[in-house]
Amino acid sequence: MNASSYQQSLAGISMWTLFWVFLRLGLTSFGGPVAHLGFFRTEFVDKRRWLSESAYAELIALCQFLPGPASSQVGMAIGLLKGGMRGALLAWLGFTLPSALLLTLFALHLQDLGQLLGWDWLHGLKVLAVAVVAHAVLSMGRSLCPDVIRRVVALVACFLLLLWPGSGMQLLVIVVAAVSALWWGKPAMGGAQNIELNVPLSKTLGGVMLLLCMALLLTLPLLAEQFKVPLLSLFDSVYRAGALVFGGGHVVLPLLQAELVLQQISPDTFLAGYGAAQAVPGPLFTFAAFVGASSPLTSSGWLAAMIALVGIFLPGCLLVIGTLPFWSTLRKHHLARQGLLGANAAVVGMLLAVLINPLLGASIQSMQDALLALLAFALLQFVRLSAAWLVLPCAVLAGLGWLAG
C-alpha cells in the first residue's frame, strides 16, 4: 500500500462497523498479546487495508515502547486513527467486553461452582497458572534478556523482590534498571521510518492526556489514603498496576498480587482467577475484572469489576493517546529506547520472583502437581498449544482427585 492509498484508508467509517470489528476480535483472539497482534494485522492490513505495513509497524513500535497492554493499545490507536477519541473508546470496548464479562461472571459464581463441583478443580487452575507464568518468564527472558548484562539485571531484580516484596520495591527496581541502562550503549533504532501517522489530535491535547496520566498516578494514592473509600483504593491499586506494566500482559500478575492479595482477596482465589483468565479470548488485563468482582469492597460485584477494569486500562489509554501526536519525534531519541531495555529486563525478574513466591509454594503441593505443571509447560513451550486448551483438562484432573495427596 503506498502513502496515498494509506491516507485514503484512514477516511472515516461508521462507528458501528468499528465496534463490530473489534467485538469480533474480542470474541475470537486467543493466545496472548503476540497472537492478538497477528490477528490485528490480518484484519486491518491484509483484509480491510485500513493500515499499511509501515503504519502498523509504527503503532506496534509505539505500544511496545510504552507501559501498558500492548495489543489493547494498538487496538485503541487504530480506533483513534479511524474514528478519533470515540473510535478509540469503541475499539477498546469491543475488544475488552467479552473476556471482562466472562471473568466477572466467573468471579461472582465462584462460590456456587465450588459448592456444585467441589473445590478441588480450582487447584488445577492454580497448577496451570504455574506453567503459564513459567512459559512467560522463559519466552520474555529470551527476547528481553538476550545478553549477560540484562540477565544479571533480571536476576538482581528477582532477588530484591523476593527479599522485599511490594509495589514500592517493584517501582524502584524498574526505575533503577531503566536509569542504569543509559550507560550500556546505544540500541539499534529498528522499525519503519518511512511514513507519518495521520493522528487526528493536536500536540496540546496529547500533552494534556500525558499530564492527566501522571497526575492520577501521583494523586490517587494520596486521595485513597485521605478518604479511606474502599472503591477508590481499588481504583488506585489497579491504576498503578496498569501504569507500570512493561513487557506483556503476564506482568500484571505480580503488580496486582503485590497490591491486592491478602488485603482484599485470598491468594487461592487470585490464582484460580488467573488460571481461568487463560481460557478466555481478548486481553489478559481483563483479569482485573475478576479481581474487582472478587473483592469484598461492595455489595455490587459488577460495580467493583467495572471500576477495576477501567482503572487498569486507563493509564495505557492515556499514554497511547497522549504520545501518538509526539511519536514521530520521540522515536528518534536513543535515551528513551535505551531506558526501556533496562525496564524490560527488570520486568522479567519481577515475573520470575512471583513464579517462585507465591506461585510455586501455593500451587505445587505434591508430585502429581509438579508432573501436571511440567506437562502443561511442555505443551505450551514445545507443542505451542494455547493455554485456553489446558484449562478444562487441568480443572477436570484436579476435580477427579488425580492431584490429591
Image (tube, helix red, strand yellow):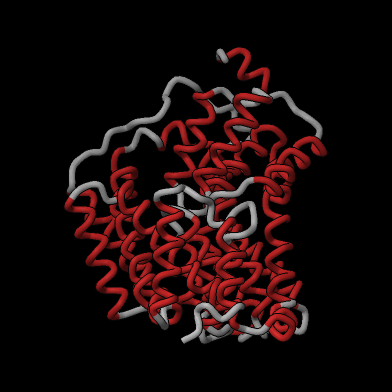
Residue 392 quadrant: bottom right
**What residue appears at the point 44 percent right and 64 percent down from the top-left corner?**
131
**What residue appears at the point 52 percent right and 35 percent down from the top-left corner?**
59
Q: What number of labels is visible? A: 0
**Residue 30 pos. (x, y %):** 60, 49
Give the vertical position of 376 relative to 187 (above or below).
Answer: below
Give the vertical position of 81 relative to 305 (above or below).
Answer: above
**What residue appears at the point 41 percent right and 78 percent down from the top-left corner?**
364
Looking at the picture, tell me which residue is in the foreground, 106 or 181. 106
Looking at the picture, tell me which residue is in the foreground, 128 or 150. 128
Residue 277 quadrant: bottom right
**Residue 100 pos. (x, y %):** 69, 61
> Left of 295 or right of it: where is 32?
left
**Residue 256 pos. (x, y %):** 50, 71
Give the vertical position of 120 relative to 287 (above or below).
Answer: below
**Residue 261 pos. (x, y %):** 51, 81
> Left of 133 or right of it: where is 400?
right
Looking at the picture, tell me which residue is in the foreground, 62 or 33. 33
Give the vertical position of 108 relative to 379 (above or below).
Answer: below
**What residue appears at the point 31 percent right and 63 percent down from the top-left corner?**
349
Q: In which quarter of the image is the N terminus?
A: top right
Observer able to see residue 63: yes
